[in-house]
Image (cartoon, grey):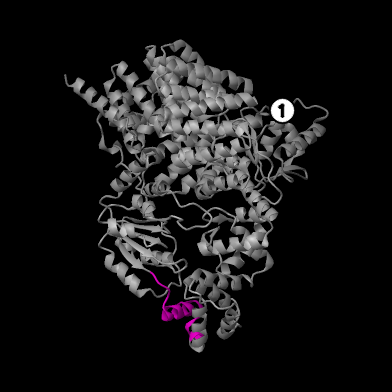
Amino acid sequence: MMSTAGTGVRVRLLGPVEVVVADGTQAVNGVRRKAVLATLALHVGRVVSVDRLIDVVWGEQLPATAANTLQRHVSYLRGVLGEPGSIVARQPGYVLNTGPESTDVQAAERLLELARRSSDRNEQVAHLTAAVALWRGPPLADVAGSAWLEEQAEHLARLRLEAERALAEARLSVGEHARLVPGLERLVRQHPLDEHLHAQLMLALYRDGRQGEAVATYRRLRDTLRENLGIDPSPRLRDLECAILRQDTAIAAPAPVAAAQPPVAAQLPPPVPTFTGRDAELAALDALVDRGGAVVVSGTAGVGKTALAVHWAHRAAERFPDGQLYVNLRGFDPAATPTDPARALHGFLAALGVPVARMPSDRDLMVSLYRTTVAGKRLLVVLDNARDAEQVRPLLPGSPDCLAIVTSRDQLLPLVVTESAQPVPLDLLSPGEARDMLARRLGASQIAAEPGAADDISDRCARLPIALAIVAARAATNRHFSLAAVAAELGDLGAFHGGDEATDVRAVFSWSCRTLSPPAARLFRLLSLHPGPDVSVPAVASLAGITPQASGPLLTELTRANLLTEHTYGRYAFHDLLRAYAASLADEAEVPAERSAAVHRLLDHCLHTAHAADLALHPHFSDISLPPPRAGVTPERPRNKVAATAWFTAEVPVLLAAVPLAARAGFEGHAWRLAWAMAGFLHRQGHWQDWLGTQRIALAAASRIGDQTGQGHAHRSLGLACSRLRRYDEADDHLRRAFDLFTDVGDDAGRAHTCLNLGQLAERQGQHHQALGHSRRALTLFRRAGNEAGQGYTLNAVGWQEGLLGNYDRALESCGEALRKLQEVDDVQGQADTWDSLGHAHHQLGDDRRAIACYEHALDLFTQVNDRYGEASTYVNLGGSHRALADFGATRVAWRRALRILDELGDADADAIRADLAQLDASRLH
């Protein structure tokens, strides 16, 4: 779903008429009400007169009460739209006031215009693909009314055809002829007299090495035109046939568009603009740049280890043209556990362009893949805030052309001894460096005017960069203060020279916090309760129980005081020492009930936003009920898959910390529900260990409070994760426990999903009879629960398993019913899977021409949802049907396409297809 402006409501006309509001799809009952809404939506932002609406809706069948009935229809539609002012009475009629691009028609027209304006063919493909995807079927499919509405439906159908033609043209121009064929074959079946589409299909087939099929396409069209219209194809099409016959180079495929190379990794955080000094340490790092291996920058908290490493890394970036990797290992973060090396490896591999599908779940295998990937590259790797050598070792590149910089409060002597890491110890700033740092922040003239006061400030800050930065921020925002006054104020805090820099710096923190407004000081304290590495503005607002608008000035106040940093737009973080200090203040100033309420609000925010994002990503999957959020919570509502993916990507580190926080803090219900809400995203991204870890916490939390529903969901999710990791016995145990728990609480949907998962597990182990039994049981339960999408997926599973057992007629019957169900709920992924199952059954029955048609349907839909595995699998099956028809050329084409995809994904099945192709070629030689 696309995002909307205005009221946030959108009306969908490119298919059955629907309304989408913040909480999901809202049905519109009654064909005349739909006609009123469609008419207003086709004039969005413009007044439609009452007379015009009556004429469109009733035509010549005008009842005496039409005007009153129209008013009732409008009142009903306002309720459906659910937003005040969505339909406004304005003489001489009504106006739909949902804002620009609040209908899918407007969105499609905008995307088509963007495609027309763009000179970049790849950009055109992106715009046109998005436009075509907006059509869900015949436009205005369930609207009855006047001839005008029929004309509009015809116009929108023509617009779709124009968009599909333009998309085919753009894809041909970028060399996508192979993947384009199934979709074009579908289109020419729908438009058997359309010469433009036939020309595109002929060209795609020819460029894919299928010259004979291209010529046959022309001749079928010629026969159809003669039979239906008594004419021959146009000269343009006849010329194309001749060019194909003589293999004219003018129509050859364009030079293949190079596969998009992953961007060079550039993960370094921004450098500190006022960095100063450290000349000796910078020179030491410069001397090591060509040596490779590892460097350990060690020193006390707040001494500037990260600032030094990041500053030098930016300065030396050009020496590492293959990229710069960075991870905060959170070794000494008071609010979180240290980063698991496996999670850091996952991030590095993704930054290096390794597909998630290629990432193994075993950590040792991940290390091997990481070092293989960086071999021969010149990379800089910054491992910040490491806890110990064991955390660091798996992340070292192992290539002599790469350099790893490790920062830690620990000297990491095991790395120095066993890995020959070079130590670069970092001490306090020298008096001169401390003075220079103040000069960079306050101006050299002010320091020159009061050098003694500047030195006093440096001494009272223990020459720690973090303390100097805070004091400088206070002085810079109060220019009327003299440095002597600042030094005197610091002196009132007491003696700093007990030898404990951490104690000294806390005194500076207290001095800075005294200048904050009470709301900002409260927010600073509450932020220590947030468990993640950084925090978004909406989460800040929920934590404090205020609006996002009210939180903005407070965040600005904290940032100006150098107590927070906005490291990425809209996301804030603070130093470990500041977090620990804020936590101590919270313990002193906030009563336990208020601390608990703040954590409750934060967890509500995480849970409700994660739940909304998960529903945007998986609208047809199972759901759970949530208690309402507390007052003061402002959850975010990602409105489409792109926004939901972006939110999860940014927030996963926070969510992974929030689950154990919830379990520790007595919010066990939040713990298991939050783990449930993020499981789908972790699965899609390949974060297997995180998935397992959060679900284990969820299971323990739900068990502690005796929540059988929560235990059931946690066991089911653990079963799925173990199945993915090939731990089949564990998976079976978890799934059976889940089924028993869902039975105890009477959750038919939970039982149904678990049965379906048990069937999938049995099928993975070749136990087809058991798989069929589980799937049939799931179907009964889904029917009892009224879950249409679940019924569709399960009917397909039943059909597939019947086919594997040789019951092909039953397979066709079950898959046919599945297809109807999935079309009703507009589940494209499920439809693609089902077409593939239908193809398999037809193939086994010897009807390979029908099987090929089914596989082509599946390929078209798999392309729409970008399911590359589905595409590859179906191409393998398609090749098998072509082989059964002795069409070895088409077999080779299909299997090569499958091989290309599997190689791109790094899938092990590629070797089997490569062997099949070699055998096919060998058999053709004898």
Name which quarter of the figure residue 558 lies in. Answer: bottom right
Name the residue beneath numbered marker 1: 30
Give the residue drawn at x 52%, y 38%: 695
Residue 664 visible in the current orientation: yes
Where does the image place residue 111, in percent across and percent down from the top left?
51, 44
- Please give the range of residues in magenta: 426-447
Residue 922: x %, y % from top left? 19, 23
Q: Is residue 799 visible?
A: no
In front: 887, or 834? 834
Considering the image in quadrants, where does the C terminus appear?
top left
Q: Kindly state the secondary structure of the residue where label 1 is placed.
A: loop
Q: Amino acid at mark 1?
A: Gly
Does the magenta stretch mainly form a helix, a strand or a loop? Answer: helix
Reply above or below: 329 against 618. Answer: below
Q: Nearer the viewer, residue 803 or 424?
A: 424
Q: Where does the image place residue 706, in percent across and percent down from the top left?
A: 63, 34
The residue most toward the front is: 498
Look at the image and say whether residue 429 sits in the magenta stretch.
Answer: yes
Q: Where is residue 295 shown, x and y percent of the image?
A: 32, 62
